[in-house]
Image (spheres, rainbow, N blue to C red):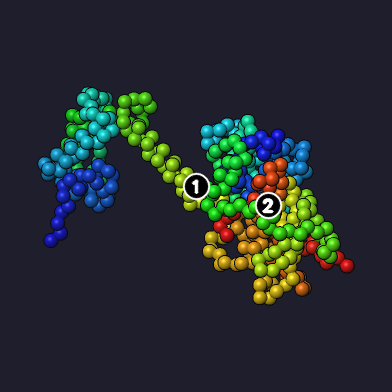
């Protein structure tokens, strides 16, 4: 006999939008019937609210939004395959939304940059980390050519060809000698090797 | 203003030297269209922007014929140092590029930067034995020159385990090396083509000789060099 996943698991996937389409109706049904699942729903939203805003928001819901939502729910035709219990579950969820002010649907990105919201700092931190990682990758592992933006030429690995290596080295040396034909004698004949061969 | 006397060099400039030495000269000339670039490249200023904390001027070196590639160049506004460049083909695809972020003062920084660059090594002056020769004295002549490319130098040198002639041409930005060696079946193939980013290599046997051309130019430009190279007399 197949075991049902824990209620919290289904609710988590439902909130994250990761629930498969086929599992959507059963999840709503379970949410409507299972007090534990509904409690998990509330807890997850509370956690999410705290994470997004740094604290529980007690602002009253926007009555216009709530009225429009409830009207829409009432008028919504149940789609084939959706559980008959779905409207009830949705109403439960909507009711909770009304209670907790989720209906404000204010995006965290609408916050001003200097708002005392630590999520901004977290986002900025991730952005800086990503930038540093990219730069480190290019400095430590990359070669002279930056591959991501290069036009695709020949992706096949090249076999070692000593004669080709010698020609390329001689050519590079000629380029360096010309470029460094400069007043400073210390670097005049420097040769720099940075290519992949 | 010369970049060397201007004392503005850094790691990224080394890459410029490696990948597009002609641009270093162009940089010194501040990409003056009236100078060597003018006949074969159109220099289009595309305004200023910010790059890696610097105000940079963006320029486009548009190739005016099919014998060479174009470039996009970002130069630091005050010093003229090239912070970034891209080599692009006729379709605008990026074939090779260099990007730098630091501008430091002092030539000593060049050598410091060398130590930081993976695989970099500096060869002391005289480390490579070159024996300059007069063009034509070796019995070879370029009967059909490629437009814009002038002879820079010609010298005997070691090439791998053998030796041969290296004849270098440049149009002020791109550079082409033409090599002439005695054909050795244990070393040379009759013909081959290699592409490494923007650097193309074309090798071909011509009688008793192995001719090779290497450069940051389209393949047909190398083909023209080898086609135009003939034994004199």
Q: List x then y, in percent, for residue B29.
A: 72, 38
Say which residue appears at 22% left-offset and 44% top-offset.
A12
Q: Indicate the chain on which mark 2 is placed.
A: B
Which element type, helix, strand or loop, lies under badge 2? loop
Quarter where residue B85 is shown: top right
Say which residue appears at 31% left-offset and 31% top-offset.
A118
Say which residue appears at 56% left-offset and 44% top-offset.
B112
Specify whether residue B38 is in view.
yes
Q: Which residue is mark 2?
A: B125
Q: Residues within 10 Å of mark 2 (few under 14, many from 20)?
A: some
Residue at the extreme right: B233
Q: Quadrant of the N terminus of chain B?
A: top right
Specify whether residue A84 is in view.
no
Using residue A86 as the reference point, say whether residue B67 is left or right of it: right
Using residue A89 as the reference point, say whether residue B222 is left or right of it: right
Q: List x then y, in percent, for residue B126.
A: 69, 55
Say which residue appears at 58% left-offset and 53% top-offset.
B121
The label nearer to you, 1 versus 2, is 2
Using residue B33 as the reference point, say whether residue A82 is left or right of it: left
Residue at the extreme bottom: B185
Res. A41 mark: none
Camera-nearest residue between A143 and A63: A143
Quarter where residue B224 is shown: bottom right
Q: Quadrant of the C terminus of chain B?
A: bottom right
Camera-nearest residue between B141 and A28: B141
Using residue B117 as the reference point, say whether residue A43 is left or right of it: left
Res. A139 mark: 1
B74 relative to A2, above or below: above
Which element type, helix, strand or loop, lies under badge 1? helix
Q: List x then y, in percent, for residue A68.
A: 26, 29
B172 relative to B134, above or below: above
Q: Indicate the chain on which mark 1 is placed.
A: A
């Amino acid at each position: 006999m197949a075991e049902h996943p824990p209620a919290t698991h289904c609710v988590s996937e439902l909130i994250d939008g990761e629930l498969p389409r086929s599992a959507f109706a059963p999840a709503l049904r379970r949410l409507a019937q299972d007090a534990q699942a509904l409690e998990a729903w509330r807890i997850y939203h509370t956690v999410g609210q705290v994470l997004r805003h740094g604290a529980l928001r007690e602002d009253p819901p926007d009555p216009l939004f709530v009225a429009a939502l409830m009207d829409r729910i009432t008028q919504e035709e149940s789609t084939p395959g959706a559980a008959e219990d779905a409207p009830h579950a949705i109403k439960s969820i909507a009711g909770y939304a009304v209670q907790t002010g989720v209906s404000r649907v204010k995006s965290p990105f609408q916050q001003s940059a200097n708002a005392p919201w630590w999520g901004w700092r977290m986002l900025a931190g991730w952005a800086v980390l990503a930038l540093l990682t990219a730069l480190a990758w290019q400095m430590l592992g990359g070669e002279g050519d930056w591959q991501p933006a290069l036009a695709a030429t020949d992706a096949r690995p090249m076999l070692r060809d000593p004669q080709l290596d010698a020609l390329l080295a001689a050519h590079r040396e000629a380029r360096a000698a010309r470029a460094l034909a400069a007043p400073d004698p210390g670097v005049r004949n420097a040769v720099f090797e940075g290519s992949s061969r | 203003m010369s970049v060397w006397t201007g004392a503005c060099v850094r790691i990224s400039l080394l890459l410029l030297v490696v990948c597009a030495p002609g641009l270093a000269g162009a940089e010194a000339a501040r990409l003056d269209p009236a100078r060597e670039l003018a006949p074969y490249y159109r220099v289009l200023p595309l305004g200023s922007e910010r790059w890696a904390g610097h105000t940079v001027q963006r320029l486009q070196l548009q190739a005016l014929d099919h014998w060479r590639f174009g470039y996009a160049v970002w130069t630091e506004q005050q010093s003229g140092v090239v912070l970034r460049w891209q080599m692009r083909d006729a379709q605008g695809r990026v074939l090779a590029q260099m990007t730098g972020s630091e501008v430091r003062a002092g030539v000593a920084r060049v050598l410091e930067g060398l130590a930081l660059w993976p695989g970099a090594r500096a060869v002391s002056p005289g480390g490579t034995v070159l024996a300059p020769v007069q063009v034509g004295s070796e019995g070879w002549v370029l009967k059909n020159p490629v437009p814009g490319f002038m002879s820079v130098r010609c010298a005997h040198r070691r090439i791998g385990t053998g030796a041969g002639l290296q004849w270098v041409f440049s149009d002020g930005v791109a550079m082409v090396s033409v090599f002439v060696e005695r054909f050795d079946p244990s070393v040379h193939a009759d013909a081959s083509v290699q592409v490494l980013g923007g650097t193309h290599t074309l090798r071909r046997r011509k009688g008793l000789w192995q001719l090779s051309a290497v450069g940051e130019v389209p393949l047909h430009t190398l083909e023209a060099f080898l086609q135009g190279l003939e034994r004199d007399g």
